Image (cartoon, coloured by chain):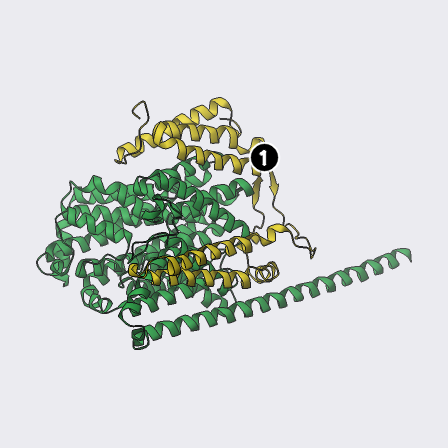
Chain colours: A yellow, B green
Amino acid sequence: MSNPLSQDHKAVEESSPKESDSPRRKVNDYLPLVALLLVALIAVAEGLRFLLYIPVQAQADMAGWYLLGLGIIIFGSAAYAERPSRVAKVRGSVVNDEDETGDVEVITPANPVRDVSLCIALVVLYAAALPFAGFAITNGLTVFAFLRFISRFGWIGSILGAAVIGATFVLAFSAIGVVLPSGPFGF
Amino acid sequence: MGIPEILGGFAEIMRPQVLLLAVLGCLAGTMVGVIPGLGPVTAIAILFPLTTYLEPAAGIMVLASIYYGAMYGGSTTAVLLRIPGEVSSLPAALEGYPMTRRGRAGVALAIAAVASFAAGIIGSAGVALIGPHLAGLALEFGPAEMLGLVVFSLTAIAALSAGSVVRGIGMAAAGMLLASVGLDLTSSQPRMTFGSTELMQGLDIVPVMIGLFGVAQVLRTLEEGAVKVRSQRVGSLMPTRGEVRRSAAAGARGTALGFPLGLIPGMLPSITAFLSYATERRRSLRRGESRFGKGAVEGIGGAEAANNSTAMAGFVPLFSLGIPTGPTMALIMAALMVYGVTPGPTMFTSNLDLTAAIIASFFIANIVLLLLNLPLVGLWAKIAQVPYGILAPIILACCLVGAFTARNSVFDVWVCLIAGLAGWAMGKWKLPIAPFVMGFILGPMLELSLRQTMAISPSSMLSSPIFLCFVAAALVSALLSYRLHRRASRAMAESAALQEGDAAARESEDESQERTIRRDGAQ
């Protein structure tokens, strides 16, 4: 196998990146707040549904109050603690272990967005194909695709790697008695 | 149960073939536990069928060996790869991984192993000597007391979160909301299911945890890049004298905290591990010398000891009352029943010999684990030296298989993916993940005890001194952590100002020196 991640990735000395001092906030800064407010909204809506629409005979009012309470707590904490101004202040006061990098060498990915997207797509395909193609084929193909397109091994290295890893998985799980889905060829 | 019975138990199991089984159990458990994403529950679940043909004492001993091995394996991946095999290994990941980055993984692993061993031995002795008596106390906890305990645990854990108790409580509530997906406890009405029949069965802990920690870690590494450290090697196993002192004291405190709490049904090892971690962190902050987040050995020793002693204490209510304290104990209870042993008070009366053999097997399993795994630390650590390009697809495949095997359901693979994306987003947005996880685990317990308390009488909370003590402890914990955070931020601001002042002074000094040199040169 030739050159794993290092082929298209360069090793760099991690330096402490300087945060922008600009007071203008980006849209990304509001994402956690928005996400948590959405979660709170779902909880409140579900709580109200239980309280208002489930018949009294079902005695689901406690469940409604519980969900409503959780929604209010999430809403309150997000509105207070996830404001970008507040988050910046809190982060400034916390010792972050990621800051303690010292002279650690990090292999910076050449195209992280592509790699992450590909990885998510592979997991989606894995979940979709597992019931039909079986474990051996799905797992082998996923490992091959990962090695070839994300880790950037050569074709032969990827095929060999996928075969070895895939066979090890199948043998190991068969040996310890784990039943995994089988495909059209019976494995 | 006295010493003669325990010695009889040792005589029963000290046979070569049984000891060999213990060694194999330890190896198998560690090998499964070392695979990122697979924890003790999964290890026991997948290896338990292989032990059913053994006699009860040997079978339980193998299960105990698998359990301890998988817990140690979980700590190994937590320290080396920052992927905890289970939630209780998270403190080991938080403190052990920074040590790995500095080439001191061996010390972190040795501290974890020795703390686990010592707590396991003390816990085993506790089960044998004081367990049956203390079980009665735990049984007296009613819904109100359990509610108080869970509220206190959640508040303490929220104090762990980055910088703000309010953020921690919010994330814990989000975790509790996720745990409420499924059918309502009493009315059986679907809630948070959005019409999905799969969601009606609720979300299993295993795929959610695997996603939050395993898949999210893979995504994070792909985005940020793999850490290439010279220090990935294990290094020496010998800690410094200071580290021994700090970790031994923390381990003793962790054992003292973990064992009594572990007697209470529902208290998982992960909770006490976090409580110990929070306590140690707070102690360290109070002293103003905190290395937490950068490789504090007391964070590893305390949490690992609490984890193991709680795991051992879980056998007390299981054996004496027939009550499992968590999913692992529930699996062991199922195994006991397969072996023809009914957990409950009869284990200390009519089945005393068998119980003594089982307790003796705990001692043996702990010793075997220490003797086997410490010298093999280097072997387990080899995983960290495999290039991430090869390791990542293996981790991902293990995670997806682990998620699938939890309930043999493809739906859980989807859950794992979504949890992975959520964990990745939380990491990007710096949202504290620990309170979220604990909210997810403790949510059902909190809801159940709350609803039971309300059904009995809301005033039962006020009439329970134990509940009031727990609530007071929760309030004190929140206030203390708020004060500590404020003090820490003030101290950091002051030190930053001092550093700036020093730098400015140094610059002006340099400038004046330069001016003097130039002047001298010109003259």
Q: Chain of mark 1?
A: A
Could you tell whether A182 is left or right of B418 in the image?
Answer: left
Disc 1 residue crowd, few under 14, some 14–19, many 20+, Cα 10 Å: some
Q: Circle 1 sits in a helix, a strand or a loop, which is it?
A: loop
Could you tell whether A60 is left or right of B286 in the image?
Answer: left
Q: Is residue B142 above or below residue A47?
A: below
Which residue is at the far left? B350
Q: Is residue B160 visible?
A: no
Q: What is the x, y in percent for residue B322? A: 18, 58
Q: What is the x, y in percent for residue B224? A: 55, 43
Q: Is residue A87 visible?
A: yes
Q: What is the x, y in percent for residue B314? A: 25, 58
Q: How many marks?
A: 1
Which residue is at the far right? B523
Instruction: Say which amino acid is labelled 1.
Output: His
Could you tell whether B455 is left or right of B399 in the image?
Answer: left
Q: Residue at image x 26%, y 61%?
A: B265
Q: Is residue A5 above or below residue B167?
A: above
Q: Residue at image x 36%, y 27%?
A: A133
Q: Nearer the viewer, residue B251 or B155?
A: B155
Query: Which residue matches tag 1?
Result: A9
Q: What is the x, y in percent for residue A187? A: 31, 26
Q: Is residue B376 above or below residue A58?
A: above
Q: Nearer the viewer, residue B20 or A73?
A: A73
